[in-house]
Image (cartoon, helix red, strand yellow):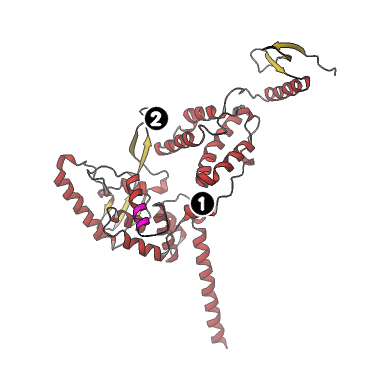
């Protein structure tokens, strides 16, 4: 094959090698330029490789493509809270990031790997996982629609989290810390809310959506059928409270309420009724168990601020409110409850999720069980002698 001869053209006062590429995938010929013949040959080869495989996206930036994919494809059929989380993730971690302005066709596993590594220390492993959970299906969609040459998502390895990241995710109060916390919240504004979280394992969104109709004092049970989410309206750009169904079917469940908690909840019920009588038409008629001053929905931030203040004033190692749920589950395991029961109480759709989250607890319990077998063996040995 003879060596192609390229023409030369002058652009902006500089001489470039020029080639007009024609291809069945192109609606019109594509003019290509380079400073050297070698560079132009490489460009032609790369472009023909893409066109031969149907790759048509040439100018789209990854950030723009991801946003369009979210709008047109990914949010379809998703719950409002889930949709909100995706857009928050995009706004906070894709817009303005190093990967936003990389051409979609040029994006590589290494680009994303480097980006993840650059934010792992400041943002934490959970943020990286959220980004990855959004990016991967987008790239698979792009590959299926011949916008990129290959699906390289499996080649991306999530950075190893720092120890403190793992601790923050699975932070469980020790028995001593739990005792100290219970004493610390005595008389606090959200005392009953914290006690309910600690002794039922309800998520904060489930607690804030709870109504008195969901609570049966007779059977000592709470029926969980909804959750509150704080979402941003994409049209008005305003944040609003939304009541939605649980994310999964398993999230709809019935939770037993400990005997000691019933009188506390009854006291709270009386206070709420008195408040309603006092405020009359100024009080929102939402029938909430845990409400704001005028009967409306409590803000996540108010509960979080109160918890942080209590922790700081009582010199307890920091934890998030979700740790009360982890602590509830851990105490159940320590008291001998079966994993399947814990799964049902937590509203996990898959037993594997329960087992993965509480691996450390089960490992400790297994060690205790081994110790009990040693004791039993020694007792039987003594009797045999």
**Mark 1 or mark 2, which is nearer the start of the sequence?**
1
Q: Which quarter of the figure has residue 28?
A: top right
- The residue depicted at 52 percent of the width and 39 percent of the height is 131
Foreground of the two, 9 or 161: 9
Per the image, the residue denoted by label 2 is: 234
Q: Is residue 193 magenta?
A: no
Per the image, the residue denoted by label 1 is: 165
Q: Secondary structure at mark 2?
A: loop
Q: Quadrant of the C terminus?
A: bottom right
From the top left corner, tell me how far across and down residue 332 is, in percent.
Answer: 41, 62
Callout 2: few (<14), some (14-19), or many (20+) C-alpha neighbours within 10 Å? few
Given this view, does label 2 or label 1 mark the residue nearer the observer?
1
From the top left corner, tell me how far across and down residue 81 is, in percent.
Answer: 40, 39
Give above or below for 30 relative to 89: above
From the top left corner, tell me how far across and down residue 199 is, in percent.
Answer: 35, 59
Region rendered in magenta: 308-319
Foreground of the two, 12 or 249: 12
- How far apart in space, not on screen, are marks 2 and 1 (Cα)? 31 Å
């Amino acid at each position: 094959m003879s060596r192609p001869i390229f023409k030369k053209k002058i652009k902006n006062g500089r001489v470039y090698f020029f080639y007009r590429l024609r291809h069945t995938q192109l609606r019109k010929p594509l003019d290509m330029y380079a400073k050297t013949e070698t560079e132009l040959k490489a460009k032609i080869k790369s472009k023909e490789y893409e066109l031969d495989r149907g790759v048509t996206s040439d100018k789209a930036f990854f950030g723009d493509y991801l946003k369009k994919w979210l709008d047109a494809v990914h949010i379809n059929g998703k719950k409002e809270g889930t949709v909100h989380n995706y857009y928050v993730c995009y706004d906070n971690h894709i817009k303005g990031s190093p990967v936003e302005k990389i051409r979609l066709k040029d994006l590589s596993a290494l680009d994303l790997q480097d980006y993840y590594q650059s934010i792992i220390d400041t943002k934490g492993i959970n943020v990286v996982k959220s980004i990855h959970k959004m990016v991967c299906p987008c790239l698979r969609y792009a590959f299926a629609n011949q916008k990129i040459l290959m699906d390289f998502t499996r080649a991306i390895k999530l950075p190893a989290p720092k120890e403190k990241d793992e601790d923050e995710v699975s932070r469980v109060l020790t028995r001593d810390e739990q005792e100290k916390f219970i004493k610390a919240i005595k008389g606090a504004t959200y005392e009953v809310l914290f006690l309910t979280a600690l002794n039922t394992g309800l998520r904060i969104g489930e607690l804030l959506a709870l109504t008195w109709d969901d609570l049966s004092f007779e059977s000592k049970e709470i029926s969980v059928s909804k959750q509150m989410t704080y979402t941003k309206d994409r049209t008005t750009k305003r944040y609003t409270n939304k009541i939605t169904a649980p994310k999964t079917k398993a999230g709809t469940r019935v939770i037993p309420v400990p005997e000691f908690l019933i009188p506390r909840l009854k006291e709270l019920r009386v206070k709420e009724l008195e408040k309603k009588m006092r405020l009359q038409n100024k009080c929102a008629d939402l029938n909430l168990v845990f409400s704001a001053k005028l009967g409306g929905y409590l803000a996540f931030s108010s509960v979080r601020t109160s918890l942080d203040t209590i922790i700081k004033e009582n010199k307890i190692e920091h934890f998030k409110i979700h740790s009360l749920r982890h602590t509830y589950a851990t105490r159940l395991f320590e008291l001998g409850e079966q994993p399947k029961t814990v799964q049902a109480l937590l509203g996990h759709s898959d037993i594997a999720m329960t087992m993965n989250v509480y691996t450390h607890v089960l490992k400790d319990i297994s060690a205790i069980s081994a110790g009990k077998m040693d004791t039993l063996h020694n007792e039987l040995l003594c009797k045999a002698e």
